């Protein structure tokens, strides 16, 4: 398997980065803890707002139309989701890294921008305005995610391993989304999607206000050569391929399940139940993954997640229905959580602090494109559920096997 285009080849003499995060020696434990608590509030608001936004849009893109119409609308949505990433790697990543306080400013702009767009879109949720709005909000959401991934290590000194800290951040997101989901669904039932949009605008605005209290670290600008050097790390290259496979299969399985359930006459409530199980699985992954990390490395976390995906996809095809779809969605949530947390911690471990924004921007661009390709397959072609699940199981298994063989080869090279 060849390396993704976003990763440059290994160069001789390239500087290797420190394998451990170096905390700021001047920061007291209380100050560090307070900074992380402030960030947790911002992240909770951003995650809750995204869930409310998804609830508001749930009836406009998919389940309000027939299966044939849903395919065309979902295909258009997938095309829209690809476009924002053309600006992330060349623009957002360098801005986050090179500007003093760029990460905090990106978090603020992302939350404030989403609040304004939700407020403006609320009266027009059933119009074509939803598509350009979705484009802009996806750019802002992904820019926030990149800034978050780059910012977390500087706020996590003394909080535990990077996997454990990223897992705490993931748990905050799931819990905040769960808390926001109930009022969001009630507003949708009692009023309409516009009311949910207005509520989301208030939540995003709260996140923007809370972000003003985040610390403003000194900029650690680095040349592009230093950013390129981060991609010469073999652990990063290997983990990026595994995470790309995981993200592509995540998109494939979610949309495969969606269309299979729709063909069986399952309504939006049933699919919402399946999505809820995926969220529960993601939360379970955030709880379990740090314990997995105690017995091994970030690479071990990624490999275990891939093997779980292989087994779950194979079991679910035996007698597919709403119950097994829910179980599979939960397992996929665990798999996605494991591979993502392992990959993020590995990049935070290997890449220099001054280039993390560019690193995560490049990788997130690659991963989103792979996710869109995976989601497009069951959207443009009516793939049978059993054949799709068997194919996913095989791909999970082959990726896990390749990953473990590559790890073993590296271990033997070190001993030699």
Image (cartoon, helix red, strand yellow):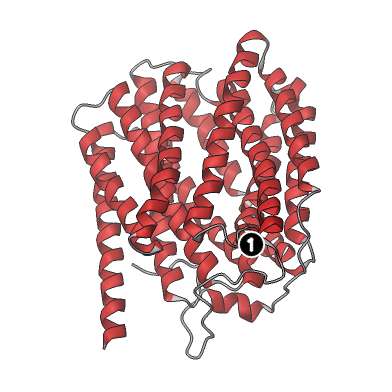
Which residue shows up at 51% across the image and 82% down it? 16
Which residue shows up at 62% across the image and 57% down it? 152
Residue that carries the numbered disc 1 in the rendered image: 89
Can you give x and y, in whole percent of width and height, for residue 279 in the image?
Answer: 46, 34
For disc 1, the neighbor class at 10 Å (few under 14, some 14 to 19, many from 20) is: many
Can you give x and y, in whole percent of width and height, for residue 25 in the image?
Answer: 67, 72
Q: Is residue 381 visible?
A: no
Q: Quadrant of residue 254?
A: top left
Instruction: Identify the residue at the far bottom of this view.
Output: 13
Q: Quadrant of residue 88?
A: bottom right
Q: Is residue 33 visible?
A: yes
Front residue of 169 and 120:
169
Front residue of 39 and 360:
39
Can you give x and y, in whole percent of width and height, for residue 359 in the image?
Answer: 58, 66
Front residue of 276 and 259:
276
- Dividing the image into 4 quarters, which one contains the N terminus? bottom left
Instruction: Identify the residue at the far left of this view.
Output: 318
Element carrying mark 1: helix
Which residue shows up at 59% across the image and 31% down it? 51
Q: How many marks?
A: 1
- Dividing the image into 4 quarters, which one contains the C terminus? bottom left
Front residue of 242 and 45:
45
Can you give x and y, in whole percent of width and height, for residue 119 in the image?
Answer: 78, 28
Residue 350 appears left or right of 209: left
């Amino acid at each position: 398997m060849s390396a993704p285009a976003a990763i440059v080849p290994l160069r001789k003499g390239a500087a290797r980065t420190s394998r451990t995060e170096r905390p700021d020696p001047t920061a007291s434990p209380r100050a560090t803890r307070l900074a992380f608590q402030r960030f947790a509030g911002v992240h909770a608001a951003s995650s809750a707002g995204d869930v409310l936004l998804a609830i508001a849009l749930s009836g406009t893109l998919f389940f309000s139309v027939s299966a044939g119409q849903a395919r065309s609308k979902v295909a258009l949505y997938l095309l829209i989701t690809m476009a924002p990433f053309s600006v992330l790697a060349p623009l957002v990543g360098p801005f986050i890294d090179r500007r003093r306080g760029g990460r905090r400013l990106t978090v603020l702009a992302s939350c404030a921008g989403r609040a304004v767009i939700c407020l403006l879109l609320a009266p027009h949720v059933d119009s074509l305005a939803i598509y350009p709005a979705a484009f802009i909000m996806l750019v802002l959401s992904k820019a926030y995610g990149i800034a978050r991934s780059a910012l977390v290590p500087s706020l996590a000194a003394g909080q535990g391993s990077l996997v454990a800290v990223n897992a705490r951040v993931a748990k905050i997101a799931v819990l905040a989304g769960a808390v926001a989901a109930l009022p969001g669904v009630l507003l949708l039932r009692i009023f309409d999607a516009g009311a949910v949009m207005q509520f989301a605008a208030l939540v995003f605005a709260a996140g923007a206000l809370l972000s003003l209290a985040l610390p403003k670290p000194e900029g650690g600008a680095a040349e592009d050569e230093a950013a390129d050097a981060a991609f010469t790390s073999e652990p990063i290259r290997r983990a990026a391929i595994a995470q790309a496979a995981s993200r592509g299969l995540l998109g494939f399985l979610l949309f495969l399940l969606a269309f299979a359930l729709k063909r069986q006459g399952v309504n939006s409530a049933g699919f919402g139940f399946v999505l809820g199980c995926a969220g529960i699985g993601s939360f379970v992954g955030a709880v379990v993954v740090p314990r997995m990390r105690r017995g091994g490395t970030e690479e071990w976390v990624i490999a275990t997640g891939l093997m779980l995906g292989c087994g779950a996809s194979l079991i679910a095809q035996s007698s597919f229905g709403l119950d097994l779809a829910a179980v599979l969605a939960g397992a996929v949530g665990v798999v996605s959580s494991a591979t993502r947390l392992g990959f993020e911690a590995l990049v935070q471990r290997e890449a220099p602090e001054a280039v993390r924004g560019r690193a995560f921007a490049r990788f997130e661009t690659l991963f989103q494109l792979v996710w869109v390709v995976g989601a497009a397959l069951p959207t443009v072609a009516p793939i049978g559920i059993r054949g799709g699940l068997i194919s996913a199981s095989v791909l999970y298994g082959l990726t896990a096997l390749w990953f473990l063989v590559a790890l073993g080869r590296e271990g033997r090279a070190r001993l030699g």
